[in-house]
Amino acid sequence: MLTRQSDGTYSSGSRDIMYLNLGPSHPASHGTIRTFVALEGETIVGAVNEIGYLHRGFEKSCENHTYNQIIPYTDRLNYCSSLANNVAFAKTIEEMLGVTLPDRGIFIRVMLIELSRIIDHLVCLGANLVDLGALTNYWYLFNPRETAYDFLTKLTGARLTNSYMRVGGMAHDLFVGWEEEMKRVLADVEQGMGDTLKLIEHNRIFHDRTQNVGILTPQRVRDFAISGPNARASGVPYDMRKTAPYYYYESFDFDTVLGSVGDVYDRMMVRFEEIRQSIRIIRQIMARIPSGAVSIDDHRIVLPPKPSVYDSIEGTINHFKLIIDGVRVSAQSHYSAIEAVNGELGFFVVSNGSGTPAKVKVKAPSFTAMSAYASMIEGGQIADAIATLGSINIIAGEMDR
């Protein structure tokens, strides 16, 4: 191993060490991560990460925008599951306001969080398999992703950055005939998963490339405060939907999926099974979703209906005040989180009584997972570093903010 010198540099002594940059231009790093590795042959004996290539100043930008104007910015955190980001932020502000959504609005939010989980896991698994050289599986998994995006486009008007949530509810109700389209989405996802698992489940090459590779121990999970499927693949049973339930999650029948080794194989298999559990939740929602409003009835928080804006002076004033000044939140600080796709996604918001926050801080699960990456690849092969990076599903928009 490298030894640290008194001047802060590292020395390999007499060993034949080669230093190499993995990224940011390496295809597996997606242009957003640089890992500086020390190699002895093809074995990684030291690694240091450099992040920040996708830093946009999200948290500072929030201080100059109203609460609803921030929601499109949250889309750009984990852009593979933007609706979950929308929900996490809106939920935080609603708790600060002391308001509760109608049941229909809550059920729609849960359904869209779980659909986002499915989409994100499909992207993660498909990309990870491409990194391993299994291109066919990419098409099997990305075809149902397109079906899901068609559903979201019809609902929100956008494929990727949806901006569908609002403080106090959402932009509008579900479209007519959404049930049949959702059934088609779920059927396509199950078909794509089945086709993929037929190719890899008993594939010796896949097992050799993923088993006992990039191991994340339960102790390291706790040391780095890792959550989500990366933690559960290591056998740590932390799932906020179970441990700190919200939005009626305690009333849904689903399982917390756990691994035993914490290697690349476990992380991938946990995500496959979590897709099945999300499908279970969505089908329960489709059977139970109530009728009624999707947003609260308070025009100090939610924009009035368009006919009211055009036909009454009160509606015009309410609309003008909300657009110009924003929703006013009393001076306080509050933290709230949800079980997002990669783990605990939380927002700590400080308000000063105006329509814009004084401070917003994001707890991003990708950041904590990336913190452990260097220690996960040290001692392994350089080819395994790519498989490990794909398996922890780092989304740089969320990590760098």
Image (cartoon, helix red, strand yellow):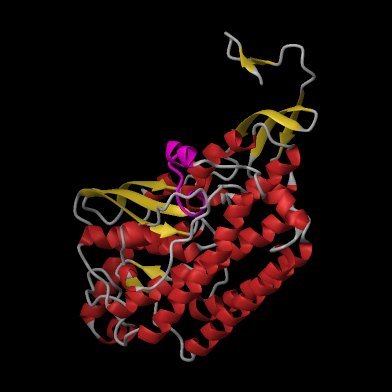
Q: Is residue 174 above or below residue 248?
A: below
Q: For the magenta stretch, what is the residue range? A: 218-231
Residue 287 on the magenta segment: no
Q: Quadrant of residue 282?
A: bottom left
The answer, for residue 45, to whether it is visible in the render is: yes
| Residue drawn at 69 percent across, 41 percent down | 385
| Residue drawn at 72 percent across, 37 percent down | 22
Question: Which secondary structure type mostly characterizes the magenta part of the structure?
Answer: helix
In the image, residue 65 lies at what x, y percent? 37, 55
In the image, residue 258 lies at what x, y percent? 49, 56
Q: In the displayed orientation, state which residue is furthest to the top.
A: 6
The answer, for residue 56, to whether it is visible in the render is: no
331 or 117: nearer the viewer: 117
Q: Quadrant of residue 204?
A: bottom right
* Numbered marks: total: 0
Residue 227 on the magenta segment: yes
119 displayed left or right of 107? right
178 displayed left or right of 169? right
In the image, residue 347 lies at what x, y percent? 36, 51
| Residue drawn at 52 percent across, 83 percent down | 182
